[in-house]
Image (tube, rainbow, N blue to C red):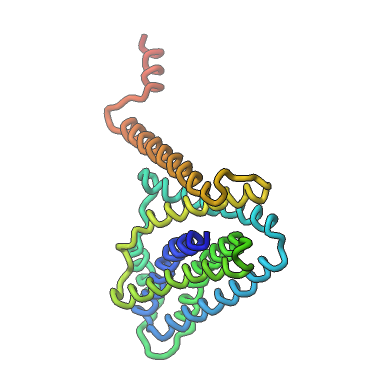
Amino acid sequence: MQWAVAIAAFLASAVEFVEAFTIVLVVGVTINWRSALVGAFAAAATLAVIVATLGVALVQYVPIDVLRLVVGIVLILFGLKWLKKAILRYSGLKAIHDEEAIFEETRAELRARGEMIAPRFEPFAIILSYKSVLLEGLEVAFIVITFGSSSATNACNNVCGINSAAIGAAVAGLLVIIAGAVIRAPLTKVPENTLKFVVGIMLTSFGTFWAGEGFLVSWPGADAFILVLVIIYLLASFLLVTYLKSYKKRRLASSEPGTTSPVSAEKHEEVHP
């Protein structure tokens, strides 16, 4: 179970860190790296405090069954939100998230403000970097706390689950930072929508499993039933994407010039029998 928690936290955190890195990158390129890094490290320290205090408090003072029920429901809602975005993008009903476009847009906004590259600390740059990392990182902290606190078992003490999730998130953050430092450009090659889809499936599956345990459901095969839930959600997502793609094709076909919808045809026959 702990390896699955670490992997889920790694994938989810990678998505959020890529988005945060884009803003830090544009602040560093447009204003200066000193301000960008100070803001980013300050936000990382804030997130570490949140995980260390809130996470440990949850596993120590909240009964595990209640915790799994509440966290399970929240994870289902959280995972469905990510799945919705990924499914809409796969079906073509929502634009793919473009980190390069976000980079250019943010850089244009900073230049419009008259921000210039300077060696000194710039309060605006520090705040922008801090805010972007903190906002994206709060989702990482949420995932680390919820996954870690709900994965406690008899073989694992109260904090080892949080430690596993935190390790996965930390590795994701480190890899994003290394990749960004080497490339020094928006990480456009990261398949963000695929990551969001996979993480959405994992969050929803774990959430369903833990919510069921909170309701004292005895799952067949114990933890192995999570794989069955993953398959169920994958099949449901595939069917939904297929339906939405066909829906989009029908809508485009009905809007093409020279085509007449069935409703319009019926009205035409009533006027001209």
Nearest the camera: 19 or 237? 237
| Quadrant assignment for the C terminus | top left
Q: Is residue 51 visible?
A: yes
Q: Relative to residue 61, is residue 41 drawn left or right?
A: left
Which of the two residues, 13 or 36, is positioned nearer the viewer here?
A: 13
- Place of residue 117 in the rendered image (x, y in percent of width and height, measured from the top left): 35, 84
Image-based side of 121 in relation to 186, left or right:
right
Residue at horizontal 36 percent and vertical 38 percent from the top: 245
Q: Is residue 155 above or below residue 263?
A: below
From the viewer's perspective, is 182 left or right of 192?
A: left
Query: In this orientation, does residue 124 appear?
Result: no
Which residue is at 43% across, 71% downward? 171
Q: Which quadrant would residue 45 be assigned to in this image?
A: bottom right
In the displayed structure, 43 sits above or below 101; it is: below
Residue 1 rendering spot, x and y as whole percentages: 52, 59
The residue drawn where x is 38% and y is 81% is 31
Number of numbered discs visible in the structure rendering:
0
Of all residues, the one furthest to the bottom in this rendering is 120
Please name the residue shown 36% across and 83% down the image: 116
Q: Is residue 118 above or below residue 52?
A: below
Q: Is residue 99 above or below residue 265?
A: below
Q: Nearer the viewer, residue 135 or 178?
A: 178
Q: Position of residue 81 (x, y in %)?
A: 51, 51
Residue 46, horizontal then vertical, whole percent = 56, 77
Farthest residue to the top: give it.
273
Q: Quadrant of residue 268?
A: top left
Observer-nearest of 271 and 210: 210
